[in-house]
């Protein structure tokens, strides 16, 4: 094992790294943004304190990227955060959350998913995605 990994300074590195990566969700190129999402996904405990703010970000794209991140974030609250994202006023944010819940959701998401199509009655894709996610969760 390298000495750097066992030093306290190495363990202090993730929070500043997270702080450096989060702005790329807003301003990065697609390649930078995807790399940032991949890097953030391996630091769930350091990302967790930022999730609530990311889900309330004024930029819907940031909220969508956050939902995408949550679907691969190995954190015990990831599915619950995705359920919270279903309350978003933007249909595409909700669609990203539905997609994530199809992968990691459980029965607790089903009632919230069932109510979603009524909020966006003209969005047939979202209704279809909810149906598919609910089936996957129910299996």
Image (cartoon, helix red, strand yellow):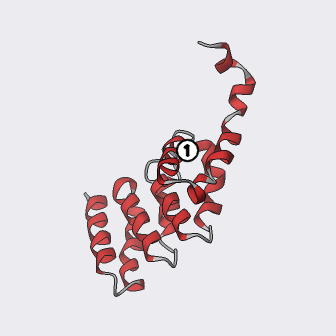
Which residue sits at x=68%, y=47%? 19
Instruction: Using the image, determine if residue 20 lies above or below residue 28.
Output: above
Q: Which residue is mark 1?
A: 40
Residue nearest the observer in this picture, 84 or 4: 4
**Quadrant of the snapshot with the C terminus:** bottom left
Image position, residue 97 (x, y; %): 43, 64
Which image quadrant for residue 125? bottom left
Q: Quadrant of residue 8?
A: top right
Residue drawn 66% across and 37% down?
14
The residue shown at (29%, 80%) is: 124
Q: Nearer the viewer, residue 21 or 67?
A: 21
Determine whether 64 is above or below 12 in the image.
Answer: below
Task: List x then y, in percent, for residue 111.
Answer: 40, 72
Residue 122 lies left or right of residue 44; in this view the side is: left
Residue 49: image location, x then y, percent = 66, 52
Q: Residue at x 25, y 64 (%)?
A: 135
Image quarter in which the N terminus is found = top right
Where disc 1 sits, the SS reads helix
**Foreground residue among 99 and 65:** 65
Q: Is residue 27 left or right of residue 137?
A: right
For label 1, the crowd category at 10 Å Cα-Cα, with few meaning under 14, some 14 to 19 and many 20 or more, is many
Question: Percent x, y for residue 100?
Answer: 40, 58
Q: Is residue 113 above or below residue 26?
A: below
Total tally of numbered discs in the picture: 1
């Amino acid at each position: 094992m390298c000495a750097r990994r066992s030093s306290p300074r190495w363990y202090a590195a993730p929070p500043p790294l997270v702080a450096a990566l989060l702005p790329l969700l807003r301003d990065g190129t697609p390649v930078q943004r995807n790399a940032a999402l991949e890097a953030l996904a391996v630091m769930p405990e350091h990302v967790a304190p930022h999730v609530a703010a990311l889900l309330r970000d004024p930029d819907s794209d940031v909220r969508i990227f956050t939902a995408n991140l949550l679907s691969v974030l190995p954190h015990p609250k990831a599915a619950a955060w995705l359920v919270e994202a279903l309350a978003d006023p933007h249909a595409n944010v909700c669609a990203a959350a539905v997609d994530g819940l199809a992968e990691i959701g459980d029965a607790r998401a089903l009632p919230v998913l069932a109510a979603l199509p009524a909020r966006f009655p003209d969005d047939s894709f979202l209704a279809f995605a909810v149906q598919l996610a609910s089936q996957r969760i129910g299996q």
